[in-house]
Amino acid sequence: MLAPRGLASDLSPDRVSIQVDGARVRHQMGGGIGASWHAIEAPIPVVDNRSHGGSGWGGYPPANDEAAWRQIYHHADWLGLDFCRVELEQRIYEPERNRFTWDSSEMRILYRILDWCERRQADVFLQQMWGNVDWNAFPEFQGDPVKRVHSGPRSMEDFANGLAALANHLVNTKGYKCIKWICINNEPGYDWSWWQRPPNEPMPLRAGLAAVRHALDGYGVHTPLSGPDQTDLPAFEPGKIDFDEFIGAYDLHCYYARFDWMTGPGYTLREAEQRLRLWREWSSARGKPPPGIPPARPIGDYSGTRPRYANGAACPSANLPFSFPARILTFLRHCSAAAELRTSTPITNGISDAFRSLRTSRMNLASRSD
């Protein structure tokens, strides 16, 4: 059972207790904790109970609904996110070649998200999920809403120019300083995923990263690229890394890690630790991401009423412990490769009660005016 402090003595010997002590810092994540936040509203097909856009579309109110966005901002403030993986597709800003719709309804939602990140100093990992445009899909994929969303770019140059134009608009024209990384495609490299060529083969990533880096430099946008953005915590194979010169950070997704004592699909935490260590050693040896990107996060002093920066100044009240994002994306230079919990006994269903207690504690802290 997962239990807040004070309940451990009531547990039977065959249960596991985890005590949370916010006053003791064991490891400080360089990028902090964040979550995905998408700006895609147009539906993406769901076929045989599979969404071909994952969970990254739909659900947000129009950008001009002030009351609704105040409520969303309030919740985001409560979470106290340090970074956001802000997701979009090419269709929302370039539905036709060289026709940019900077004022589309979904672009205005994107500005809403970036406005919050800018105001709260949350670092943005700007993620183009896929293209989803007929004009740059392979001919075999055009006109099919499922195949189109999986298609890689038919013209890599047009793809790169479009994404660079977006970055120029956001960074140079709109002035968003919160955008710290750009990722060109979600989870490439698999026959079921995105960035595909006919019939459904994964395309190499190198050409896309090279083209986008060149196009960004042409606009004077020096935001680093991140990659390979693959899932599910792939084994480290240096022979397949032919794109290092074009990126400033490495990122991976991890969904199917399981405790060492479990059986079934996926991989154990021990194996995950070993994979992460190899990726981290590789990226760190190449200085990626560079020191100071992202800037070091404050270490909270939770013995008082709210966290404090190292210089003693109070952090904003939203920057409190115990955020539980939908997805954690770790930049490998800063990740902790040590699995902190290994056990041979099952963890029973007390986790929801523990999280509820932590959430209540956080709400009580956030409600204090001192």
Image (spheres, rainbow, N blue to C red):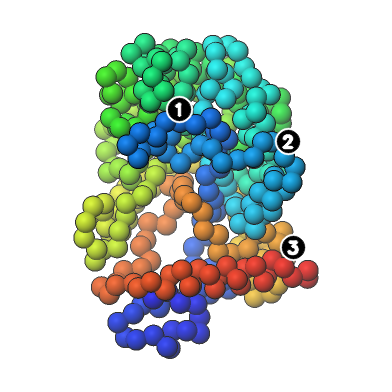
Residue 296, relative to residue 125: is it above or below?
below
The amino acid pointed to by label 2 is Asn
| Quadrant housing the C terminus | bottom right
Position above or below: 251 against 160: below
Three-letter amino acid code of the residue under disc 3: Ala
Tell me how far mark 2 sits from mark 1, CA to CA: 26 Å
Residue drawn at point x = 42 percent, y = 39 percent: 54
Q: In this view of the protein, which residue sits in the foreground, 365 or 272?
A: 365
Residue at the farthest left position:
263
The residue most toward the right is 369
Local crowd at mark 2 within 10 Å, few (<14), some, or many (≥20)?
Answer: few
What x and y, as percent, mark residue 3? 45, 77
Q: Residue furthest bottom?
A: 9
Residue positioned 48% across, 39% down in the render: 56
Report which residue position mark 1 lands on: 130
- Specify the quadrant of the image occupied by residue 185: top left
Q: Secondary structure at mark 1?
A: loop
In the rendered structure, the answer to whether residue 358 lies left or right of residue 313 reads left
Relative to 268, 94 lies left or right: right
Q: Tell me, yes or no, whether the two marked residues, 2 and 3, touch with CB atoms within 8 Å.
A: no
Total numbered labels: 3
Cα separation between marks 1 and 3: 42 Å
Residue 308, quarter of the rendered image = bottom right
Check disc 3 and report the residue beneath it: 313
| Distance from the alpha carbon under mark 2 to that under mark 3 | 35 Å
Per the image, the residue denoted by label 2 is 64
